[in-house]
Image (cartoon, helix red, strand yellow):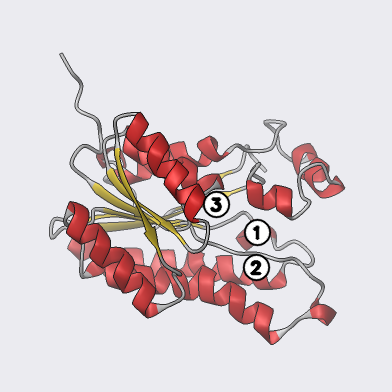
């Protein structure tokens, strides 16, 4: 007897899914039976590798290019997804950028870069998703951060973007509840990602300090985050909305 996968027949869009947490989320949603649009802004090779991994494992996925901070690109992402798989059931707003710097190095361009991707991006994606969502409802999962509560020094712009995303999550859970669309956020702690390697976090005193403050005693892996996202996307989480869940090993 074959078990029905919990996301069988569902269609998911995962933004920023070419590597790291987004790639893990795309793989887990596909493994649970969803057809996945693997969005990327610039890393086509990474996105196509994620699609190849999913397809090889018997799942369904397509790579879709687009910057979440541009209306035309977001329209393209959803038009392509709908044309390929039909109505959308799951949106994961994972695309994000960050750079830590003290306030005396603040620049308007860095402010706009982070807010355009981390806040405007989810707004545009959610607005566009609504026009393409299954009429029965669905699930939106925003990838926030422990930074929205921790507010570490030198992260004033990044922390502000994630605090905004938490607020959007709470508000839209109330607004979209009548449409049976659930809106939740996941707040990862430190995670071993290509982005954190590139930023010099892995192996740094900052990383060691985070691990020291994490009861489970290690840095997170992308799969640790993806498993919770897959749960929130599923019917097992049908009575959960408006929540911001720490997935941080107790940090």
Dot 1 or dot 2: first in sequence order is 1
Q: CA distance from mark 2 to mark 3?
A: 13 Å
Q: CA distance from mark 1 to mark 3?
A: 8 Å
Q: Kindly check if marks 2 and 3 are in contact, taking CB atoms under 8 A apart as contact.
A: no
Image coordinates of residue 12 in percent, x first then y, are 30, 51
Q: Which residue is mark 3?
A: 187
Between circles 1 and 2, the one closer to the viewer is 2
Q: Kindly check if marks 1 and 2 are in contact, taking CB atoms under 8 A apart as contact.
A: yes
Question: Which label is found at residue 88?
Answer: none
Q: Quadrant of residue 172?
A: bottom left
Image coordinates of residue 166 in percent, x first then y, are 50, 64
Q: On the rendered image, what quadrant is the N terminus found in?
A: top left
Is residue 232 visible in the rendered image? The answer is yes
Q: Residue at x 44, y 42 (%)?
A: 50
Compared to residue 42, the image places residue 227 above or below, namely above
Q: CA distance from mark 1 to mark 2?
A: 8 Å
Question: Which label is found at residue 158?
Answer: 2
Q: Quadrant of residue 154?
A: bottom right
10 Å crowding of disc 1: few (<14), some (14-19), many (20+): many
Q: Residue furthest bottom?
A: 108
Q: Which residue is mark 1?
A: 147
């Amino acid at each position: 007897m074959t078990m029905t996968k919990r996301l069988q027949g569902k269609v998911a869009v995962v933004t920023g899914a070419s590597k790291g947490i987004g790639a893990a989320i795309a793989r887990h949603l596909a493994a649970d039976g969803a057809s996945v649009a693997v969005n990327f802004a610039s890393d086509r090779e990474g996105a196509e590798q994620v699609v190849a991994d999913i397809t090889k494992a018997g799942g369904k996925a397509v790579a879709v290019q687009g910057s979440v901070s541009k209306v035309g690109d977001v329209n393209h992402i959803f038009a392509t997804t709908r044309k390929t798989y039909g109505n959308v059931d799951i949106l994961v707003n994972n695309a994000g950028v960050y750079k830590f710097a003290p306030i005396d190095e603040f620049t308007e361009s860095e402010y706009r870069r982070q807010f355009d991707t981390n806040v405007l991006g989810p707004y545009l994606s959610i607005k566009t998703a609504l026009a393409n969502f299954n009429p029965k409802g669905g699930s939106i999962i925003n990838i926030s951060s422990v930074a929205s509560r921790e507010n570490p020094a030198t992260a004033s712009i990044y922390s502000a973007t994630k605090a905004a995303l938490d607020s959007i999550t709470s508000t839209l859970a109330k607004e979209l509840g009548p449409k049976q669309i659930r809106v939740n956020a996941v707040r990862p702690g430190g995670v071993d990602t290509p982005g954190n390697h590139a930023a010099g976090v892995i192996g740094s005193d900052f990383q060691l300090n985070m691990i020291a403050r994490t009861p489970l005693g290690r840095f997170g892996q992308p799969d640790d985050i993806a498993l919770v996202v897959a749960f929130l996307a599923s019917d097992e989480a049908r009575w959960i909305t408006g929540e911001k869940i720490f997935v941080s090993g107790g940090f």
